[in-house]
Image (cartoon, rainbow, N blue to C red):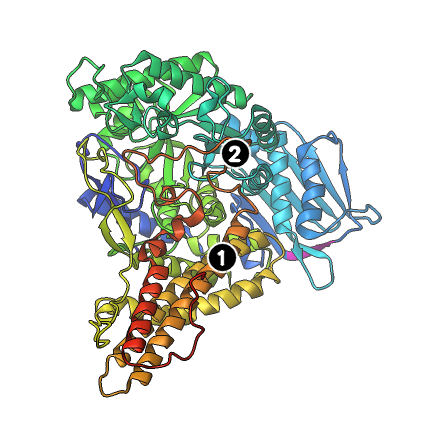
Amino acid sequence: MKVFRIKLLRFQSQSSCKRNKKLISMKFLNELCFSAKHLLLAFIFVFSTFSSFAFLTDLRSQGYSLIPAPQETTLTGKNISVDKSWKVQTDISNNSIALKRLHEGANDLLALKFEGTGSGKIILEIVPGSISGNFNAIQTKEAYRIQIEANTVKISSNAEAGLFYGVQSLLQLLKPTPRSDFNLPEGTITDWPDLELRMIHWDTKHHQSRLETLKNYIDWSAFFKVNAIAFEIEDKYEYPRNPIIGAPGAFTTAEMHELTEYAMERNIQLVPNVQAPAHMTFVLKHEQFAHLRSDGSNYQACMCDEEAMELIFDMYQDMIDATPGVEYFFVSTDEVYYAGICEKCEDEYNDENRSQCWVDYLNRVHQWMEEKGRKVIAWVEYPLLTEHIKQLPEGLIDGIMVPNSSKEWVAEQNKTGVKQLAYSSMQGSEYLFPNFFENRYRNRLNSGRLYDASVNIDLVRANGAKPIGTFAAAWDDSGLHSETFWLGWATVTQYAWTNNKPSLEQNVADFMNTYYGYDSPYMVDIYQSLQDGARFYEDLWERRPSTERDMSYGSSYGPTPYRLSDIYLEMPNLPSVSDLSVNTNFRDKNKEKIEGATKLKPIIEELIHKLIYATNHVSRNRYNLEVYLSIASLEKYTINTVLDLAKIENYMELASDESKNSKERIAYLVEAYHLVEQIITNQREMWNSLEEVWEKSRFEKCRSVGGRDFVHIFDDVKDHFADRRLGLEYMLAPFERMEIGKWQNQLWDVINEYAQANDVQIEGFEVKRLED
C-alpha cells in the first residue's frame, strides 16, 4: 500500500495550514510526519479507492483512450469506421470554436479532412436542457453527450463549451487503423465535470515563452479540459503604469489581449497572477522602488507604506486591463513571511499582528477587486491565524487547500464562506525533471506527485473541505522546461473532472496515447528514466559556503540572516610536480556516486536511443521529445563526467608508481589530460544543442532588447536554482564551479615541469602555444 505523505510545517500553529509547494524545501516544509488522523484517512481512502476503481474503464478495455475519463459510458463492444468521406452536419455558426476545432483538430492531429462524399455524418447540436442532472451552472454549460452508431456520430450539449468538449473527446477517441481510416466505439458517452474550476499554473519568473508556444499550450490545455490558467507573469508584462518593471521584451498589452481572447474562445480563463506583497524582487530590485522595501529587503514590500500599496494596485490594474473579460484575479499573497515588520508599521511585530496585517491587506484587495468585477483567488496561508479566518470576505477562493490543513482551519473557512481549490504541486524544487513516480528523494521515500494528485481531492474532502476546483502548480524555481509538466497538469485535471476514476496507471497510459498518439513506444519508460537521471544529477553535488551570493536576509523561520551555499563537485587532487605522488581520495569519497553512475549509464544511454526512436514514431508533440532528449543528454554528460573523473584519478595513481619509468608515468598523465579535454568538449557540444532546443519555444533568458539590458539582482530571501545565472547556464553552474578547464591547465603544468625535470619528451598531444 502506498502511503500518502503529510508535511509538518516548521512554525505552523495548530490552526495554520500550508501547501505542499516544494517537495522538500529550505523554507516551510522540512519534516514528514503522520498524525493518527491522517493515517486513518489515508487508510480509509486507499481501500475505498481500490473498491471503486476497476482495473480498466470500459473505453480502455475496448482499446480507446480518453482523458479525462468520462462520467458515463454505455458501449456495445463493437467498433464503427470513420473516414474522410464523412460530412459534418450542423446548424451552429461557422465561427463556432467547436466546429472549427473539429475540422482543424482532425487535420492537425489525424491528417483527416472530412470531404462529405459518403453517407457517414457527424452531427453537432446545442440543445439547452438536453443533458441534465444535479448540476451547477458550470457543469450544465460543460456537459456533453456523444452517441456513436454506424454512419452517425452525434455530439449534443447544453451550451457551446459542452459542444467544444464533446469535439475534444471525439478527436481523442478516433483511433487510426492500418486501413487509413479510424475506429470509434459504438455506444453513448455522457460526460460532465465533477469540479467546476480546473486550473493549471504557468510560472514565468525565470523564463519567457514565445507567444506561439503559449497558444499551443492553450490548445493542449483545452484538449485536457482545463478551463483556467493562473499566469504568474512577474516581470514578463510591460506594466504601462510603471514600465521599468517589465523585463526587456516583455509581453505588450496587445499581445496579452490576443492571448486572453485566444484562451477565452477555448473556454479557458487566463487568470493573472501577480506576486505581492512578497516575492517582489522583480519590482523592488529597481532603485526607484528601493524605499518601498520592507526592512530593507527586496523580497517584500512594506505593507504599511501607502505608496507601496498604490504601486501594487497599479500592477493589479495593468493586469486587469491586459486580460479583459476574465472573471478571476490571483492576488497571490504567497509566502508573506514578514507582514508588518516594516519600520513604518506601528504595531509590534508578533504572530497576532502579523496575521492581522495579512488579513487587512487581503480584505482591502478583495474589496478593490470586487469593484473591478473580479473574483479573488489567494494563497490563504501563513501568517494567517485560525482565529482571524472569520474576518476574511465571503466568496474568497483559497487556492491551496491541502490534506494536512487542520479540521479547525477548514471548518472556519467553510463557516466564513471561503471557497477552496484542492492544491497539487507538479514541481517544487526538483532539478531537470519532476518526481512524477515513486522514488527516494533527499533521503526520504517519495510516493510521487502523480499519486499525491490522484488522492488529493478525497483527502481534503475527508478533512471537511468543499473544493470547487483544483490547482495544478508547476513552479519555475528550478527552471524546468514547461514541456516536462504536461503529464502532471493532465493528471490533476483528470481527477478534477472525474474524481474516482480511472486508476492512476490507466491515467498515465491514457495520457501517453492522447498526448503522443496511439501506440507511441516506450513512453512510460522514458519518463521513469528521465526522473532517475534527474535525481542522480541533483544528488551528485557537494555544498560549500557561497562565494556568489551574500548572506540571505532570512527565511520562512524569520528575518534571521544565514549563509547560502553553492553546489559543486570537488575535483581529484593533482599530483606533486616533484615525484608525481598523489592523494587519491576522489573515488573513495564518491564511491556510492560512482557506483550509481555505473548502474545508471546504460539506462540513460538506452533512454537516448528510445527517445530518438520515439521521435519518429509518435504522431504529435515531437518537440516535447526533443526537450526530453536535451535533458537526457545533460544527464548522460553528468554521469560520464563522474566516471571520467574516476578514470582520471586512476591514471594519476598509475602515474605515481615509482617502479615505472618517467616516460610511462608521463604517458598516464597525458591520458588523464586527454580525458579532461573530452569532458570539456562533450560539455560544449551538449550545451550548444540544449540551448538551441530550449530556445525554440522560449526567448533567451534575461535577454537584452532594443538597447535595454535585463537587471539581474538576487532575491534577498529566495535562492532559486534557476536564478544563479543570467542564462540557461544555471544547469551548468555546478560544473563551472569545478573549474575543470583551470584544473586541466594545472595538470599540464605538472606534466610539463616533470618532463623537463626528468629530460623526457612529451608524446601524445601537441605542445600548447602561448597564443592558445
Mark 1 burial class by Cα count in 10 Å: few <14, some 14-19, many 20+: many
Q: Residue at x 26, y 61 (%)?
A: 570
**Residue 561 or 279: which is nearer the viewer?**
561
Image quarter where the N terminus lies is: bottom left
Question: Which circle's residue, 1 or 2, is located before the other in the chain?
Answer: 2
**Residue 726 or 449: which is nearer the viewer?**
726
- Magenta region: 78-82
Q: Amino acid at mark 2?
A: Asn
Residue 169, quarter of picture: top right
Mark 2 burial class by Cα count in 10 Å: few <14, some 14-19, many 20+: many
For mark 1, what is the residue?
A: 630
Residue 181 placed where, x, y %? 73, 57
149 sits left or right of 290 in the view:
right
User: Does the image show residue 197?
Assistant: no
For mark 2, what is the residue?
A: 227
User: Does the image show residue 550?
Assistant: yes
Image quarter where the C terminus lies is: bottom left
Picture layout, residue 267 above or below residue 187:
above
Picture layout, residue 252 above or below residue 178:
above
Q: Residue at x 57, y 62 (%)?
A: 614
Does the magenta segment cover residue 504?
A: no
**Residue 218 or 282: which is nearer the viewer?**
282
For marks 1 and 2, give the CA distance.
Answer: 31 Å
Residue 137 placed where, x, y %? 52, 26
Residue 375, quarter of picture: top left
Picture layout, residue 327 above or below residue 581:
above
392 sits left or right of 130 in the view:
left
SS class, disc 2: loop
Q: Amino acid at mark 1?
A: Ser
Q: How many numbered marks are there?
A: 2
